[in-house]
Image: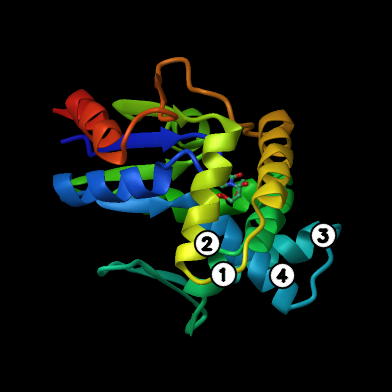
Amino acid sequence: MEISVLTIDGPSGAGKGTVSRLIAQQLEWHYLDSGAIYRALALELTEKDVLHDSITEIVEVALAMDLVFESGEEQLVILNGQDITDLLVLESTGNAASKIATIPEVRAALLQKQRDFKQAAGLVADGRDMGTVVFPEAQYKVFLTASALTRAERRYKQLKLKGIDANLLKITTDIQERDQRDSERQFSPLIPAPDAVYIDSSNLSIQAVVEEVLSLVR
Ligand code: DC
């Protein structure tokens, strides 16, 4: 039987992570946080001092990454034996990830790692190109977005809750820059799949979005 895949794509801060995790829990499906893979690679490149123009070296690092997602109350991300969960959420990590994500060879190197998450009984895949490139065959596709200001305010609250110092204006500018880079890049840009259901979460609660997405699957 074909394994079910639900893709949730959209810009940073639209609520994809929270919504995808809740849906995966309710359906008892696997969860792929593809952004965390790009973020982990960005961290590893900084750690190893690899320059952004050394594409061969970046691809080698990408292929060698031993990345483990431990699901529990909070998802832990372990890279080469080291817990990098707290470093992953930093805005600087997201910005670095968005930059290396423009390189087509890097995207190609990470493709199989992402496809390996497709396992029974099903998968909820969260990212930018899940429905267009990684799982074009997915039965259920959502494009989840929200206004830039709403997304910046959500990110600000998330960081504050984690005790991380944050500045709303800086986050808004970063989000707009990142949106532009992710949407205008030549390879696998952030665009809705033609068969995706478009949801604007600006005025919706998390629960309302979860219900709407679940109604597509059920
Ligand atoms: O979803 P996120 O904010 O954790 O993603 C961080 C960056 O990684 C995002 O700005 C662009 C890149 N990314 C991507 O290019 N493709 C994906 N499927 C997921 C993330």
Q: Secondary structure at mark 1?
A: loop
Classed neighbour count for the residue bearing mark 2: other residues with Cα under 10 Å, few (<14), some (14–19), many (≥20): some
Q: Earlier in the sequence, mark 1 or mark 3?
A: 3
Inter-mark Cα distance, 4 to 2: 24 Å
Classed neighbour count for the residue bearing mark 3: other residues with Cα under 10 Å, few (<14), some (14–19), many (≥20): some
* Rendered location of residue 198, percent (x, y): 41, 20
Inter-mark Cα distance, 1 to 2: 5 Å
Per the image, the residue denoted by label 1 is 164
Q: Earlier in the sequence, mark 3 or mark 4?
A: 4
- C-beta proximity under 8 Å, tags 4 and 1: no
- C-beta proximity under 8 Å, tags 3 and 4: yes
Compared to 164, does 183 lie above or below? above
Residue at the extreme bottom: 81
For badge 1, the amino acid type reads Ile
Q: Kindly tell me whether residue 37 is visible in this rendering.
A: yes
Tell which tag, 4 or 2, sits nearer the viewer. Answer: 2
Q: Secondary structure at mark 4?
A: helix
| Snapshot quadrant of residue 89 | bottom right
Q: Earlier in the sequence, mark 1 or mark 2?
A: 2
Residues 2 and 41: in front is: 41
Per the image, the residue denoted by label 3 is 52
Q: Earlier in the sequence, mark 3 or mark 2?
A: 3
Q: Secondary structure at mark 3?
A: loop
Q: Kindly tell me whether residue 66 is visible in this rendering.
A: no
- C-beta proximity under 8 Å, tags 1 and 2: yes
Per the image, the residue denoted by label 2 is 159
Q: Earlier in the sequence, mark 4 or mark 1?
A: 4
Q: Secondary structure at mark 2?
A: helix
Per the image, the residue denoted by label 4 is 45
